[in-house]
Amino acid sequence: MTLLRRSVLQSIGLGAASLAVPSFGRRAQAAAPGPAPVLHRFHIGDATVTALLDGHLALPTAAFTGSDPAAVEAALAGTLYQAKDGGVEIPVNGYLVERGGKYTLIDTGTAQLMGPDLGGLSAALAASGVAAADISTVLLTHMHPDHAGGLLAADGSAAFPNAELVIAETEWGFWQDDAIMASVPADAQGFFQMARNTTAPYADRLKLFSGEVEAAPGFTAVPLPGHTPGHSGFMLDGGDTQLLIWGDIVHSTALQFPHPEWTIPFDVDQALAAQTRKAMFERAAADQLLVTGMHIDFPGLGQVAREGDSFAFHQAPWQFGI
Amino acid sequence: MTLLRRSVLQSIGLGAASLAVPSFGRRAQAAAPGPAPVLHRFHIGDATVTALLDGHLALPTAAFTGSDPAAVEAALAGTLYQAKDGGVEIPVNGYLVERGGKYTLIDTGTAQLMGPDLGGLSAALAASGVAAADISTVLLTHMHPDHAGGLLAADGSAAFPNAELVIAETEWGFWQDDAIMASVPADAQGFFQMARNTTAPYADRLKLFSGEVEAAPGFTAVPLPGHTPGHSGFMLDGGDTQLLIWGDIVHSTALQFPHPEWTIPFDVDQALAAQTRKAMFERAAADQLLVTGMHIDFPGLGQVAREGDSFAFHQAPWQFGI
């Protein structure tokens, strides 16, 4: 059976460091034309949302802290999420929101930072008929390279020449802090470098927010700390309907809904990440929130349901909201 | 919350007749441009498969014979499949297969037979870059109007001018049998009329098959009787990978994987339909078959897994097989 062959992260060193860094740079020059653009449009009240697929990466299942091989095998049994060599397929999504003729992009994908099998977001955006220059606001859930990578064009300039860049103040401060950077293992410092490099061209049009405020017109910030210090969701108010775009509350649909306690080395504070995930699942299930996220199976739209002591994700039908 | 508003089948008379007929004709002239084309391409070995969405229809949950409201409510809890007025959303898919430069279409959607919210398959086909005239073979899983409707162009001519039409001999014989047609309730005879009308322009290029034979190059027929007498799946041989396109083994992903015993009035033989579904689920789970179907949630690609005494569907990740 032909399975996916993306394995950028299979070379991650999974040591004791809480911020292990894959060697993204090595493949940066190998970027090749990716697969056909994958996008899906739906409506949230008077807003039009287009899910844009950047691609999939393969994360070793051993990366999930707290997991054990038998439980992983049980969670993946009968699914098609097993990547070659034993990893699990992780999608990378971004979301374009149009409302009142104004375009907001939430996260930007990897561009060329995570290998030639990803970086499809810009082609998906183009296929949606929207030019990068049309985007007036880019919201970042956090500053990891699979979310901020697409801020840069291939020549290193701003990929979104007319966009204001909006990030939580806590998030910005963490990655810009030289003392914190100096305190992490050498191989984890690459995340700081990438966070700084990808956002640098936007220095003169940066908007930092703090707390549960309106981060951009129609988007209320929802602090979700743990994965990163300033990791934030954004609640889109579509009038009669709301959608929570929750960033990296989930990295694997197959593994973390049934096992919200499993974390990954990229969580800056793994204990807090698990706590925030559980609390978010509880709220989403109780309030029947409509949610989407950057690593939920594309297109990522659905609801969370309680299943005993655990949770499940129920994907929305295609053509939801038309 | 904005939910789907397709309710063509909500006017179905759900009486004792095993073949109740919705009044499709009344809305035939109201067809309007549908939503944006929805399609998804994946690879099965050396074959390229494009899932084409015709649209969604809302089936009243009371239509599921053997179900009870509490069990339906439990199965739908936390999902987004509830249509307005209490029905459940049912997608209608077709599949285009390209192999060696030859195009085969498996089922054709509703065209204008089931209201203006469906009929999107031809636009999805066009969006895939394939003209109707390029299709050399149309395989029908069975002759219901949501599968055969698209055989007709708006003017009543053959929508696929160069295609051979391939159907199980048993299926063809059933719908063409005047004695059987005369024996069913008057309001069920419309199915016979539609089956005849939609296939009529292909009378001079019809190929009937019987048993587990090669129905078309690369496609082996899999008899799956019950829903209709000649209801058939087709096993696509992609070289190193196979895909079973199983027609109407499932009408509701949310309801019939957990409850394979629930049937619908459109099953010509409901007991046999349930028996065939259970046997198909058993085989698919045991053999870890890659399957897709015309009413599995779009794009419909995945695997069946046993869950205790019941079953679950695990959708393949996007970009499967690239």
Image (cartoon, coloured by chain):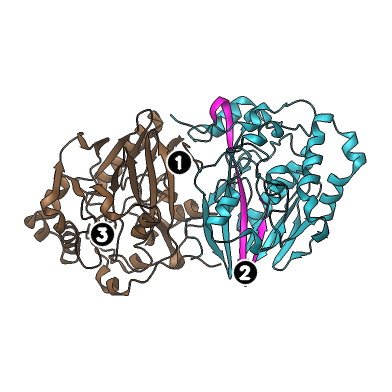
Chain colours: A cyan, B brown
Q: Is residue B54 magenta?
A: no
Subunit under mark 1: B
Marks 3/2 in contact by CB < 8 Å: the verdict is: no
Boundaries of the magenta span: A83-108
Residue B260 in the image: state x and y as whole percent.
Answer: 37, 44
Which residue is painted at 55% across and 54% down in the image? B78
Q: Do tag 3 and tag 1 residues touch (Cβ < 8 Å)? A: no
Q: Residue furthest right?
A: A179
Q: Position of residue A24 (x, y in %)?
A: 70, 34
Nearest to the observer: residue A239 or residue A208: A208
Q: Residue at x 54, y 41 (%)?
A: A34
Q: Chain of mark 2?
A: A
User: Which residue in the structure is indicated by mark 3?
Assistant: B149
Left or right, A131 with respect to A37, comes to right
Q: For the residues carrying marks 1 and 2, which lies nearer the camera in this image? A: 2
Query: How far is the residue under mark 3 from the one under mark 2?
Result: 37 Å
Q: Nearer the viewer, residue B18 or B299?
A: B299
How many angstroms separate mark 1 from mark 2 (CA)? 37 Å
Q: Is residue B9 left or right of residue A163?
A: left
Q: Which structural element holds mark 1?
A: strand
What x and y, as percent, mark residue B313? 45, 42
Is disc 3 placed on a helix, strand or loop? helix
Q: Which residue is mark 2?
A: A99
